[in-house]
Amino acid sequence: QGEVTATSVYSAKIEENFPLCAKNMMNGLKTVHHLRYQARQQLTFFLKGIGMSVDDAMQFWSDAFAKGGITTEKFNKEYKYNFRHNYGLEGNRINYKPWDCRTILSKPRPSRGEFHGCPYRDWNVDKLTLELSQGMKLTQTQVNSVLDNVERTEYTVACTKVFEMTHGGSTNVEINDQTHISHPNLYYERSRQLQK
Ligand code: SF4
C-alpha cells in the first residue's frame, strides 16, 4: 500500500503539500460532503497522480459522500463507474493523466457551490488575500507580490511564488524554467521532497 491512502490523505503530512487548488477541493469535500463533476474529475486525477490506488480512491470517495448521506448503494449506482473510468478500468480504458494547470484553466470556471479550477484565477481578491495572509502566513509584501501576478493573469507564476514563499524561499523569487510550477502534481512532489 502506498503512502497516500483513503485515510492518510487527510493527514497534515500529506495535505500540507497540496497546492491551493487541491486544498480547495478537499475543503469543499469536507464541508459539503460532495463535489460536482468537474471537481470530482480534477481531484481524482490529482490524487491518482500522487499515488492513491483505485481501491483507496473508491474508499475515499464513498466515505466522504457517506457523510453527506449518500448510501453505498447510491454511490455504487451513480458514482463508482465514473471513478473507475478515471482509473482506466471502464469504458475506453484510457489511462488518464493528472491535469496540468493549463488543462485546469481551460475548463469552465466554477460556479457557486463548485470547487474545481484554480483559486488564483477563480477567487476574488478578498478571499485570496485572506488565504495568503492568514492561511499561509505570508507577509503583506509577499501577498502584494502574489496579487500582482494574479492581476496580470499569471496564475501559475503566482502559485509558484507561493510555493517558494511557503517553502523557505525569499520574497524576491526568481521564476524560471527550472522553478516554474505548472502542474499541481509537480507542486506536491516538490513539496513532499522538501519535507522528507
Ligand atoms: Fe493548482 Fe496550478 Fe492553480 Fe497552482 S496554478 S492552484 S497548481 S491549478
Image (spheres, rainbow, N blue to C red):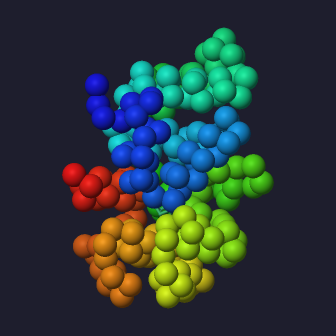
Q: Is residue 66 left or right of residue 179?
A: right
Percent from the top left, x then y, of residue 156? 46, 71
Percent from the top left, x then y, of residue 17? 38, 54
Is residue 77 visible in this depiction of the protein? no
Q: Is residue 174 left or right of residue 140?
A: left
When asked about the image quadrant of residue 175, the answer is bottom left
Return the residue found at the far top. Answer: 73
When asked about the image quadrant of residue 153, the answer is bottom right
Percent from the top left, x then y, of residue 118? 57, 61
Q: Residue at x 77, y 54 (%)?
A: 112
Q: Residue at x 53, y 81 (%)?
A: 143
Percent from the top left, x then y, of residue 80? 57, 21
Is residue 18 visible in this depiction of the protein? yes
Which quarter of the image is occupied by the N terminus? top left
Q: Is residue 127 left or right of residue 147?
A: right
Q: From what the image shows, is residue 65 above or below residue 180? A: above
Q: How many marks?
A: 0
Q: Residue at x 67, y 35 (%)?
A: 33
Q: Residue at x 69, y 74 (%)?
A: 126
Towards the viewer: 93 or 50: 50
Q: From what the image shows, is residue 71 above or below residue 51? A: above
